[in-house]
Image (cartoon, rainbow, N blue to C red):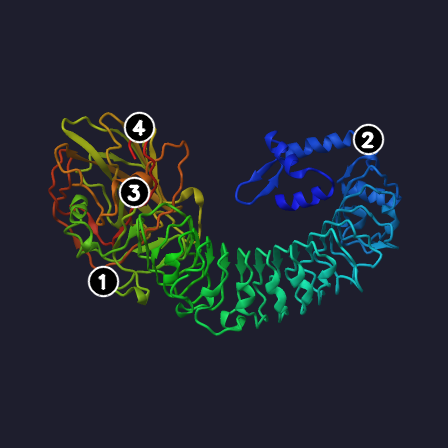
Amino acid sequence: MDKDYIVKILDGCDFYTIVGIQNLIDRCLVTIIDGWDKVHMHDLIRRMGREIVRLESKEPWKRSRVWHHKDSFKILTEKNGTETIEGLVLDMHMCPTNSPTNSNEKVLETNAFSRMHELKLLHLSHVKLNGCYAEFCTGLRWLCWLEFPLDSIPTDFPVGNLIVLEMQYSGLRQIYEGTKCLWSLKILDLSHSHSLTETMDFSYCPNLEKLVLVDCTSLIYVHGSIGNLERLIYLNMKDCKNLRMLPRNICMLKSLETFIISGCSNLNGLSIEMLRNMDSLKVLETDGIPISELWLERSSSILDSLPCSLVELSLWGCNLSDDAFPIGFSNLSSLQRLNLGNNPISSLPNCIKGLARVDELSFSECTSLKSLLGLPKLNDLDIFNCISLEKITYQSSYEKCSTGYGFNYNLVEWEYRYKLQPIGSVDVEMINLLGLCNLLESMAPIRMHTRWRNLPTADPIPVQLNNNVIFIASIYRDCIFSTFFCGNEVPGQFSHKSRGSSISFTVPLLDNHRTRGLIVFVVYVNADYDSRIIHPNYESRIRVKNKSNGLRGSYYPSHYGIPGEGEDMIWLSHWNLDDELQGGDEVVVSVTMESGLLVKELGIRLVQVQQEENHNMMSISTDSSYDDRIWYNYGIWDSDEEDKREEDFSSFVCLPDEEEEQQDDITVATTTGSKNSGGLGGWKVLAACFCSLSGRKKRPSTSPG
């Protein structure tokens, strides 16, 4: 549970809870889950504690805690509870004789609790009680009664000492008949009470700090006294679909920090002044409510008038267009988390660029979004199902953040990650290095597969992205370049070959040369490929492992070529390893293909250059931003024992349907550092090109950066 929640309950039980929890943490008996402030106890520790309680007595009713539903049911049925019991749990559905299918469900008596004078913690589920409540657990601090059966809490119900009252899924129509003082109550949770039509007079619970009315679908009225709750810090009325108005004095909630009205689809007439005056408001969630219908004002600067104390703002599905945003969020200097998902915006609002502290942005389901240009520094970015998104750039140098993505079919440029571009504009040295310079005009369409769907061949370039056409592209991401096309054998110039899916070799020692990378040449065949079958152990992947220093890298393309039945295909990949391979190193390269695709032959060619040659001669970056610092942080090598998976953001393209035998001899950069270029002799080129850079790198501890 939440630490704050526990503290409130146990403080009411006369514990020094803050000190006590810290003592338990120091003794490693409980932990606090980072980022969630949740208190967690390991199952073995809990089992040990329960064993200590079990040893208190052979009779369950003489123990301080009763957690077995069978024991609780027996105690209440036989009415032999004692003053020893401080906590009790009973779920009637967990008792065999009181299963949901049993029509003769046992109804217990309220006087079964009359002798439990020290009972402070009570958790009931699906329990029905008959009788008077005058002597029912007068010392309770926490009462959680799921599916409370009555339509109102009885007037004789002893609630004077309650700190927390939870009655989720109750049958309540109103909380009380008449008035009832709950001076100690701090948390009231009536979520999913679908019959509740109105709230209580809050003047009788002046110390309330947390009010939860989630999914109270019949609630139409909130008592005006809510504005008098000076200590209320959390108010959640999510999915109260029939709630139409809020009291105007809600603006008097000066201590309110979290205000959630998401899904209140019939709510209208909320004045911006109500929010602006909430000086402590940190979290505001209005998901699913069209802004034009929510606010009384019709000003275009509504969003610029929000309280400056906000730390988290969620406007998911509020029908916000590009012109709904102000020039700047100058007043939201404390904002850290912003959710603009499911809105018809087409670009990054300029006002977001000025949010200095924002570190979490969500644009999920923004299907009209085309560009995110000038993103600020972030820790989390969500672009899931942004199907029209084409380009992402940043204000400053990129620092890796957690990203939620998927179904971003048109994303062709992601700064510091990859860039799609016509194959003809790829760096000339890379084209020459791979021997593709004479093949550009002869490449024909091939069938490609993505993890999201199969994509057909497309028209030849030039094409327009807004027509949703896939085009010839090269992707530069973390120093790996890949392409797929038709072919059936490894060229003779590849010095290391294997009739299988793996190959081992030793890096040769050459004077005045250094190894800058390697070229992987894979020939594979369609044995029985079925795009409907997804098997996580058979994803297309290239692995490179340096056995001499323990470094390893993996590359998973998100798209790959699918040969026709019985046909062969080539996967050609260049890895810029930046001197990670030294003379004498033992290296293993292995390839795994999707289920139904089999590797027939594997070839490896080392790229070695003379020491005196320019350091950037073999660079495959077309953007000056791909400097050494980025390479150190986001390359492909990792020294951990297990491969660390990083999804590739690669894409593919299709060329005109042409077939042509290539007669030119292949001449790529040789192990002696020559820079000759030419065609790929002996390769029957029928394919489109797919080029990608992807992976993960972690420099060894002995390297700089």
Q: Residue at x 70, y 61 (%)?
A: 193
Q: Earlier in the sequence, mark 4 or mark 1?
A: 1
The residue singled out by tag 4 in the image is: 702
Q: Position of residue 491 (x, y in %)?
A: 19, 41
Report whether 115 appears left or right of 300: right
Distance between mark 2 and mark 4 Cα atoms: 62 Å
Report whether 503 appears left or right of 170: left
- What amino acid is found at the position of numbered circle 2 in the picture? Ser
Q: Earlier in the sequence, mark 2 or mark 1?
A: 2
The residue singled out by tag 1 in the image is: 461
**In this view, 446 is above or below 46:** below
Q: Residues within 10 Å of mark 4 (few under 14, many from 20)?
A: few
The residue singled out by tag 2 in the image is: 57
**Would you say residue 388 is visible in this rendering?**
no
The residue nearer to you, when weighing 304 against 40, is 304
Numbered disc 2: secondary structure: loop
Q: Earlier in the sequence, mark 3 or mark 1?
A: 1
